[in-house]
Image (cartoon, helix red, strand yellow):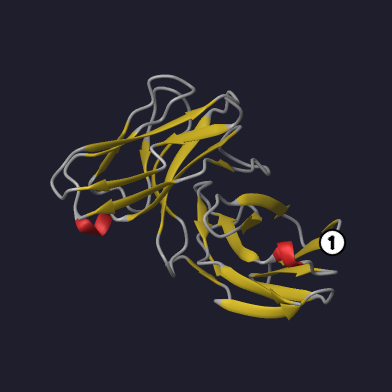
Amino acid sequence: GQNIDQPTEMTATEGAIVQINCTYQTSGFNGLFWYQQHAGEAPTFLSYNVLDGLEEKGRFSSFLSRSKGYSYLLLKELQMKDSASYLCAVKDSNYQLIWGAGTKLIIKP
Amino acid sequence: IAGITQAPTSQILAAGRRMTLRCTQDMRHNAMYWYRQDLGLGLRLIHYSNTAGTTGKGEVPDGYSVSRANTDDFPLTLASAVPSQTSVYFCASSDSEGKGANEQYFGPGTRLTVT
């Protein structure tokens, strides 16, 4: 079966750094996506990794290791507005996205 | 219209009734998708369409049908609603299916309660 695992919830402090992990087992791999979803809103795209390594985009970075079936999203200089759920998704051999249940990130002052 | 819209925003529906959720995009994207999102579960694909005139079944298609008569519209129909279809429904679109980033853009969602 196909499976995406993420922690259910994480708590961090404003101004700090947090790393959200994602492990996956899928039939084929055609890229890994991270999306942000604020409560009651639609998911919005954050990042895409298809090759091993780190992709940096401002305060957010995403890392991929295909051999380990592992990715993480790194958020630096946390702000209160970063309180949201972060969704990991893998595009499988049929080019369909398989989604994790999401990690709810709580930022405390 | 800018982006992707869905209607209605929310709906309470009696079990057994028929309901169509509407989705329209103005980005001229080829691919469109319907997901449901339930607490504690990831987004689950119901149906998809890679291009106008074609549709395909996703992970949880039972009880739902779709059509894709043109590029812009992708309605989702519940023929006879059941309480287990209570969920938040998201429509999404992407430039094309296949390799590459092809990020999906999501509509604001429809919150459906079946009583």
Quadrant of the image for the C terminus of chain A?
A: bottom right
Q: Note whether B72 is above or below B79 in the view shown.
A: above
Can I make out residue B13 in this image?
Answer: yes
Of residue A42 and residue A32, the one placed in the foreground of this image is A42
Left or right: residue A18 versus residue A9 is right
At x 73%, y 79%, the residue is A12
Quadrant of the image for the N terminus of chain A?
A: bottom left
Q: Chain of mark 1?
A: A
At x 43%, y 25%, the residue is B73
The crowd level at tag 1 (other Cα within 10 Å; few <14, some 14-19, many 20+) is few
At x 65%, y 53%, the residue is A31
Left or right: residue B75 versus residue A85 is left
Of residue A33 and residue A50, the one placed in the foreground of this image is A33
Residue occupying the far front of the picture:
A109
Can I make out residue A53 in this image?
Answer: no
Left or right: residue B57 versus residue B19 is right
Residue occupied by mark 1: A59
Relative image position of residue A72 (x, y in whole percent): 71, 70
Left or right: residue A25 versus residue A56 is left
Residue occupying the far top of the picture:
B70
**Quadrant housing residue A82:** bottom right
At x 21%, y 57%, the residue is B83
Number of marks drawn: 1
Residue kind at label 1, given as amino acid type: Arg
Q: Note whether B50 is above or below A103 in the view shown.
A: above
Relative image position of residue A21 (x, y in whole percent): 66, 74
